[in-house]
Image: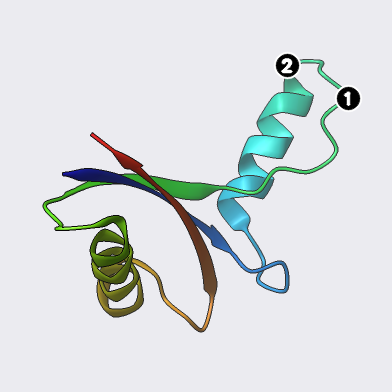
Amino acid sequence: MYVSKVRITLRKSILDPQGKAVEHAVASLGISRIKDVRMGKYIELIVDGASEADARQTTEEVCKKLLANPVMEDYHYEIEKV
């Protein structure tokens, strides 16, 4: 068994209105050191794979077909043996 830790973020070229809202909220708290906020998603998948390569292939397929929009989002993941 493996755990895949997936991070999905909007591409830099895509506007991030949720990130901007958080950025403005932080400024309204009087915190001026935060200059930019980008929001994303974090997902953990438990993969019952025969090997790390198998878990990696399964994670890649799920990211491409379901979790990430390849036009607007990038994804990165780490795989750990459980």
Question: Foreground: 66 or 1?
Answer: 1
Q: Position of residue 3 (x, y in %)?
A: 27, 43
User: Which residue is drawn at the image coordinates 51% and 50% (left, top)?
Assistant: 40
Instruction: Give the position of the N terminus as an image quadrant.
Output: top left
**Residue topped by disc 1:** 33
Q: Secondary structure at mark 1?
A: loop
Instruction: Give the position of the C terminus as an image quadrant.
Output: top left
Q: Amino acid at mark 1?
A: Arg
The 10 Å Cα crowd at callout 1, few under 14, some 14 to 19, many 20 or more, is: few
Residue 66 position by quadrant: bottom left
| Rendered image: mark on residue 29 | 2
Marks 1/2: CA distance? Answer: 11 Å
Residue 15, placed above or below residue 64: above
Residue 27 position by quadrant: top right
Q: Amino acid at mark 2?
A: Leu
| For residue 72, side relative to residue 21 (left or right) | left
Q: Position of residue 10 (x, y in %)?
A: 58, 64
